[in-house]
Image: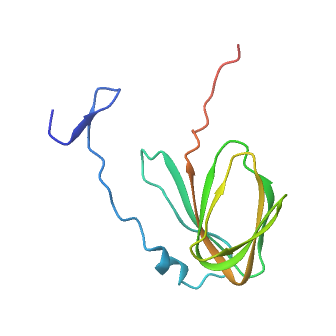
């Protein structure tokens, strides 16, 4: 086997994964954005994580919801806003790192300059078709 290669369950040999720079989030958040949505998504094949850089324009919100299956980390990259939970609200400012445990209810509101944040969580498995028992 070649040095720097790994064997997959299928028996094939693939190159060893290498670290790489994906983007500059400060550059992405500095671009003019008219609507809310993802500015960037992790799309590398074989990944075990999902990550998104999301922007909410000023005054926009993500309604209160619960993620039943996954813990999520949220890192505020630019702007500011409010995290709303059943226990109250927390200020979100640049550099704030928030843990959103699975099952927790949360909502977000962007303040006057909008809110850009990175979310990271385990990748959801793809849909699978199973036969009925």
Nearest the viewer among 70 and 133 is: 70
Q: Residue at x 47, y 80 (%)?
A: 27
Relative to 118, residue 30 above or below: below
Q: For the C terminus, which image quadrant?
A: top right
Residue 82 pos. (x, y %):
75, 72
Q: Residue at x 33, y 60 (%)?
A: 20
Q: Quadrant of residue 84?
A: bottom right
Farthest residue, direction top = 133
Nearest the viewer among 55 and 75 is: 75
Residue 36 pos. (x, y %):
68, 73
Relative placement, left or right, of 59 versus 131 is right
Q: What is the tally of numbered marks visible in this picture?
A: 0
Farthest residue, direction left = 2
Q: For the N terminus, which image quadrant?
A: top left
Residue 4 pos. (x, y %):
19, 42
Q: Residue at x 78, y 71 (%)?
A: 61
Nearest the viewer among 91 and 18 is: 91
Q: Quadrant of residue 51?
A: bottom right
Relative placement, left or right, of 64 versus 7 is right
């Amino acid at each position: 086997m070649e040095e720097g290669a790994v064997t997959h369950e299928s028996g094939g040999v693939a190159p060893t994964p290498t670290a790489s720079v994906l983007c500059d989030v400060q550059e992405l958040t500095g671009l003019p954005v008219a609507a809310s949505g993802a500015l960037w998504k992790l799309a590398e094949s074989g990944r075990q994580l999902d990550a998104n850089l999301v922007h909410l324009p000023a005054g926009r919100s993500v309604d209160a919801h619960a993620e039943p299956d996954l813990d999520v980390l949220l890192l505020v990259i630019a702007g500011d806003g409010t995290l709303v939970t059943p226990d109250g609200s927390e200020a979100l400012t640049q550099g704030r790192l928030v843990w959103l445990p699975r099952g927790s209810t949360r909502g977000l509101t962007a303040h006057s300059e909008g809110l850009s944040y990175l979310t990271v969580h385990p990748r959801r498995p793809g849909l699978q078709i199973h036969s009925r028992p």
